[in-house]
Image (tube, helix red, strand yellow):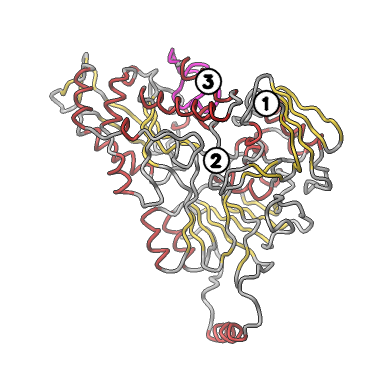
Amino acid sequence: MSPFSIVSRRGFGAMAVALALALASSAAFAQDAPRTGGTLVYLEPQPHTVLYPPAGGFYPNGGILNQITDKLTYQNPQTLEIEPWIAESWEIDATSTTYTFRLRPGVTFSDGAPLDASAVALNFDTFGLGDKERNFPVSEVLNNYERSEVLDPLTVRFHFKAPSPGFLQGTSVIGSGLVSPATLRRNFAELGDARLIVGSGPFTVESETLGTELVLKAREDYAWGPAKLAHKGRAYLDAIRYVIVPEDGVRIGALTSGQGDVVRQVQAYDEEGLTSQGFAISAPSTRGVNNSIVFRPDNPLVADVKVRRALLHGTDTKAIVQTLFSGNYPVATSVLASTALGYVDLSDKLRFDATEAARLLDEAGWTIGASGLREKDGQTLELTAYESLPQPQNKAALQLVAQQWGALGVKLNVLGGDAGTAVSDNLDPAKTPVSPAMVGRADPDVLKSHFYPKNRNVLLQTGGISDKVKSFRDDRLNALLETIASETDRARRLSLAGDVQRYVVDEAYAIPIFEEPQVFGAAPDVKGLAFEAVGRPSFYGVWLDR
């Protein structure tokens, strides 16, 4: 049963149909002119978690924060250029250690507090330094942050301990959404309540039923959209109703029956059915680290690079994509998506070659035993991974990988992502030597966010949040990541991003599978749907042609 109840807008009676036809024939209004009013029903597969902006990388979180917060700058999703928004202008010193922003006057948070230099300084001091008292972690998009300096009510300067060339782009991302000082005075755990997130964006939170539904309403006095957008005033919609619908089939059914207007995470097998009925499919790129399988070399079973290389070459990514996905999911040709800044084509290093895979396993001392599985020193080559619920068809993809590795004599156990021990087990390389992973961001710093021990630490190195890692650490990789985060020469920085991609593939730390989009379905009368640079929806310019 659907977890929500709403009358279908397509279930008109005969009188309503006749009236609609009469109105259409009158040609009394312009079809292309945006109209103000109406409530958009948005169907999301997962509930949000914590809405502290640096936690906005989780797409259900970002899909909310993108409507209720503004950013200092705006990254154009077509050109990836950084454009003015709350900041009218900025200056960067030659070493990228000092950034000065001049703010737009007259901007306020929805609680009436001014969005001035002091508020911006408090936001970035909290994001860049963390706050142990309130359990706020340091944002993964800010590197080498030292302090803020308020020069006057509309001018703020940021100082960095070392060059931070990614900071300007970092001011445009969902993790840098600006919130009221009142929000930052709360504790991290409180901010799962969307009603406590006070931003300056075009929508505000009206009500919430935790884990089930969220209603946003338009802010009537909003007048500071990104400088280069034609639309800068109040949102066209009156409201947005977020409804959590985990079941794929229920979300699609709600869309086609008129109970929903926009759905996130349309699975590839549903795309053709929707387009054939006149529904629009959008699949914006996440422009970051591709959907991949990563290894945790602290586990002895995958500590040998020959084993990891064998499994890389034993994975037929083209077959996985052709079996499960559509043309909206390009086969990965590197660690980064082909739409990402700094991408290099590593197709030759990622080729499927089962013969080479078997040879490498033999060379590593893993031979086929009586059970049909590879054995060495009395141990079976048996690995475990948990599915990642946010990633499309991840369980099915891992099961195909398990079949392919099974042909080599390697067993991969795929466990459900909703298991109670999944979170703790994923921090223990002894229990999960294999894990799915991806992250979106349109800047080379995304590599540091993904692999660096003090960030997401997907390889589980020492020095990260896991206390289960015994010894694994790759100082060469970490040095490359630190250099990317500090290199001020753009060409050199992009070249270093290429070095990281080659190194990760040469060490077979990851098996890139496909370039992950965010796939949305929308009703024909939804106009103006847009997405920020890594695929989160923007409903600011949406209007309903009804």
Check residue 96 in the rendering and tell me which mark sits there, or answer none.
Answer: 1
Within the magenta stretch, is there residue 467? yes
| Tag 2 near tag 1, CB within 8 Å | no
- Chief SS of the magenta region: loop
Q: Earlier in the sequence, mark 2 or mark 1?
A: 2
Residue closer to the observer: 173 or 349? 349
Distance of label 2 from label 1 (alpha carbons): 29 Å
User: Residue 351 is drawn in which quadrant?
Assistant: top left
- Where residue 150 sits in the image (x, y, percent)? 82, 30
Give amino acid for label 3: Gly
Give amino acid for label 1: Ser
**SS category of the residue bearing label 2:** loop
Residue closer to the observer: 105 or 375? 105
Q: Quadrant of the C terminus?
A: bottom right
User: Which range is magenta?
Assistant: 451-473
Check residue 106 in the rendering and tell me which mark sits there, or answer none.
Answer: none
Mark 3 vs mark 1, foreground winner is 1
Distance of label 3 from label 1 (alpha carbons): 27 Å
| Tag 3 near tag 2, CB within 8 Å | no
**SS category of the residue bearing label 1:** loop
Q: Does 441 sit above or below residue 483?
A: below
**Which residue does the image show at 86% across and 37% down from the upper left?**
153
Give amino acid for label 2: Phe
Check residue 58 in the rendering and tell me which mark sits there, or answer none.
Answer: 2
Q: Earlier in the sequence, mark 3 or mark 1?
A: 1
User: Residue 156 is drawn in which quadrant?
Assistant: top right
Residue closer to the observer: 505 or 35? 505
What residue did someone put label 3 on?
A: 464
Give the residue furthest to the right.
152
Within the magenta stretch, is there residue 8? no
Residue closer to the observer: 100 or 181? 100
Q: Earlier in the sequence, mark 3 or mark 2?
A: 2
